[in-house]
Image (cartoon, helix red, strand yellow):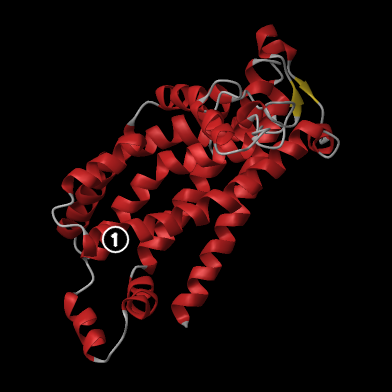
């Protein structure tokens, strides 16, 4: 390579670095360095109200504490249940709703807007409405149940057994519009002649749905599954507004417990330990999902 070529390559390298340098600096300052600091703090005991000088290195004591912390165990279990229920329900409902809108609703712009409104609505406003609807004594839901003969309807958000299922229902209701719209965009990309060929071969609508729609929509399904899993592990607003993790710890999830530990108990060291425990769970679940996707893709 001659001197002129080397100079041109060097110039191109500097220009390229100039383009990526702002993004790289942002990643280092706002992502990489905070992650490293968080990992280091997870091995400490620190009340951040007392300043940096109050940091005390405690080794693995925070991680050992996890196994005897009832709030952590319940929050971890609730998060797994929340994800295992809401994500499959959202995928199934979203796909069915999208398929109905795609095939049986003509000019569905108004319908798409209506089902998407809960997703973009204020979480606090949505939760306030649901709190009124699920009020144990005078809420319309329990009033209706009493009218049809249910003598002791559930306490819903105030009930130890029903608080988490109630939040799941609210979460699904709010999120399902987004899933339906994304699935609908995926369905629009399936060629119509594929369905025509299936109809010529005598395939019923149900057979077309399971043999054509579901396989061809698998990339969209995978995307929504990954995003749904991550989103379900980050659920916080609904818990904070509706139940504050109660009654007891019956509806507490990891994101809310991390917040509570950090900003109510001011135990920043243990809060970072909880955050890394949550990261480990999300990482394992996502890794399994990727492996399953690779397996089905090869098949």
* Residue 299: image location, x then y, percent: 47, 83
Quadrant holding the N terminus: bottom left
Mark 1 lies on a secondary structure that is helix
Q: Where is residue 120 in the image (x, y as percent from the top left)?
A: 32, 33
Left or right of residue 91, residue 4 in this image: left
Residue nearest the observer in this picture, 44 or 165: 165
Estimate the x, y position of residue 37 in percent, counting from the top left: 61, 30
- Taking depth in this image into account, of 214 and 103 the one nearest to the observer is 103
Q: Can residue 138 be seen in this view?
A: yes
**Horizontal side of residue 260 vs 209, given as left or right:** right
Callout 1 crowding tier (Cα within 10 Å): few <14, some 14–19, many ≥20: few
Which residue sits at x=65%, y=48%? 80
Task: Please name the residue shown 39% across and 76% down the image.
Answer: 210
Residue 253 at least partly seen: no
Q: Would you name the residue on which mark 1 appears?
A: 100
**In which quadrant of the rendered view does residue 117 lie?**
top left
Vertical relation: 155 (above or below) 47: below
Tell whether 257 sits left or right of 220: right
Q: Residue at x 71, y 33 (%)?
A: 250
Q: How many marks?
A: 1
Q: Which residue lies furthest to the top in this view?
A: 50
Q: In this view, does 46 lie to the left or right of 163?
A: right
Q: Where is residue 42 in the image (x, y as percent from the top left)?
A: 70, 31
- Please name whichever residue, 97 or 26, is drawn nearer the observer in this view of the structure: 97
Relative to 271, residue 232 above or below: below
């Amino acid at each position: 390579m001659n001197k002129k070529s080397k100079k041109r390559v060097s110039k191109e390298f500097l220009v390229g670095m100039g383009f990526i340098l702002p993004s790289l600096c942002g990643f280092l300052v706002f992502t990489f360095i905070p992650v490293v600091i968080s990992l280091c703090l997870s091995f400490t005991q620190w009340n951040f109200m007392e300043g940096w000088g109050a940091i005390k290195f405690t080794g693995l004591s925070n991680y050992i504490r996890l196994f005897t912390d009832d709030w952590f165990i319940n929050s971890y279990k609730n998060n797994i249940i929340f994800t295992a229920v809401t994500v499959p329900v959202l995928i199934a409902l979203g796909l069915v709703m999208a398929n109905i809108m795609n095939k049986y609703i003509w000019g569905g712009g108004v319908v798409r807007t209506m089902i998407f409104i809960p997703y973009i609505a204020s979480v606090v406003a949505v939760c306030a409405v649901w709190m009124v609807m699920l009020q144990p004594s005078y809420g319309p839901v329990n009033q209706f149940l009493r009218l049809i003969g249910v003598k002791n309807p559930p306490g819903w958000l105030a009930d130890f057994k029903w608080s988490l299922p109630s939040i799941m229902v609210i979460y699904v209701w709010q999120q399902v519009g987004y899933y339906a719209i994304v699935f609908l965009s995926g369905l629009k990309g399936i060629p119509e002649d594929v369905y025509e060929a299936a109809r010529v071969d005598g395939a019923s609508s149900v057979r077309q749905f399971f043999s054509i729609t579901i396989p061809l929509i698998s990339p969209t399904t995978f995307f929504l599954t990954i995003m749904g899993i991550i989103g379900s592990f980050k659920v916080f607003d609904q818990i904070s507004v509706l139940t504050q993790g109660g009654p007891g710890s019956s509806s507490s999830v990891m994101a809310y417990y991390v917040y509570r530990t950090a900003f109510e108990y001011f135990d920043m060291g243990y809060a970072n330990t909880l955050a890394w425990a949550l990261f480990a769970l999300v990482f394992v679940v996502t890794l399994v999902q990727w492996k399953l996707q690779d397996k089905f893709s090869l098949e």
